[in-house]
Amino acid sequence: MGNELRKEERFQEEGLGDELDGEEILEELTDYDYDDAYGLDSIDDLLKLDFLSIDEVEVDKFHFGTLPIAFEFYNRFVKESRKKEPKTETRTECGAQFQVKFVGVTGRWHVTRFSNVHNHELLEGRLSRLLPGHRSMSKAEIALINNMRKSKISTSQVYALLASQSGGFDKLNYGVRDMSNQIAKVRREIPENVGRALNFWRRWLQRINLYTIKSFGGWIEGVNHHNQTVVFAACIVIDETDETYIWVLQQFLETMNGRAPSSVFPGAHHRLCAWHLLRNATTNMCSLRFTSKFKDCMLGDYEIPLFRSKWQTLVEEFGVEKKEWLNEIYEKCRSWTTCYI
């Protein structure tokens, strides 16, 4: 790292006006000659490579004809470098077996075949407790572990205490990792009373959302009588293709009992966002007093003739008859005024 910094400093000292040959720069920044570099000009050259034999040093010696080839090379190199060597085969084709059969007449299990001939060394009896089939914790031990963990006792201390009560670590049928897994399992479980509370709120939210959809005609989002935003649905998708977007809209449409936005079905009423309208009014008119009166016209519960009268009064009061933004907004009044909604 230090050598590279010194090389870069030397290049800076030589100045921007000095011309350096590209091969000389490459040789300075790497530990190999430019002639030793490997050129990849096509996908065919890429397919001939054995990525498992390329180490971190060799990977710097490649140069590429195009950017897509470089991207594909490093993408494959990362995938192959994460692969691990296969584990050593430990099976020995041992012939030992124990078979039983249930006899319905007697209602008992009968041994039909038994062979204790092994072709490998057997595990010591004192270590048999560590076999997966033998590792287990009793309900009393699990309850004791949970109580001690609630008292902020560490996992290693809990394990040492249980070993002391059992007469030694070799008397326990499980290890520290088994205990940690059990603690994590309990932590993930939702208590019964908490689960009931979550289900109650989930059902309540579903009823509220369906009610607001029927009342205010919204679909994915909208506002209620208190000018508060109501979000009815959301979705996380894996990509942004047309097929995925169409599928999402179809699912929303089915969930919302056929209520659809105007961009899909003209029968739905399209509205403009009140918050954005107020922000744009402040930006374009540069008057908080105008914004306040504009808000009154927008959200006031007026009949259509009264709304038009108030709008005319507002325009004349501020002398904004020729304001382009205001005229465009008035043409869209059916999408934002309460009297038309």
Image (cartoon, grey):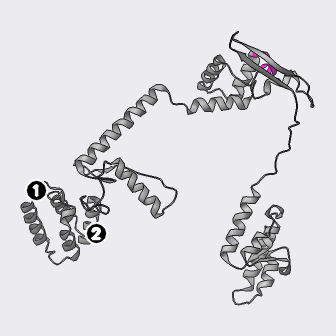
Magenta stretch: includes residue 169: yes
Image vertical order of residue 79 relative to residue 123, above or below: below
Decide if residue 196 is on the left or right side of residue 156. left
Mark 1 Cα shell of 10 Å, populated few (<14), some (14-19), many (≥20): some
Image vertical order of residue 114 relative to residue 214, above or below: above
Residue stretch in magenta: 166-172
Image vertical order of residue 147 relative to residue 49, above or below: above
In which quarter of the view is residue 165 placed?
top right
How many labels sit on residues? 2
Q: Quadrant of the N terminus?
A: bottom right
**Amino acid type of the residue that numbered disc 1 sits on in the rendered structure:** Tyr
Residue 50, given in percent of the width and then of the height, sits at 81, 65
**Amino acid type of the residue that numbered disc 2 sits on in the rendered structure:** Thr
Decide if residue 202 is on the left or right side of residue 51. left
The numbered mark at residue 83 is none
Q: Secondary structure at mark 1?
A: loop
Mark 2 lies on residue: 283
Q: Secondary structure at mark 2?
A: helix
Judging depth in this view, the residue of 166 and 205 nearest the camera is 205
Measuring 32% from the left and 61% from the top, which residue is drawn there?
264
The numbered mark at residue 302 is 1
In which quarter of the view is residue 320 placed?
bottom left
Disc 1 to disc 2, how far (Cα)? 26 Å
Asked if labels 2 and 1 touch by Cβ distance under 8 angstroms, the answer is: no
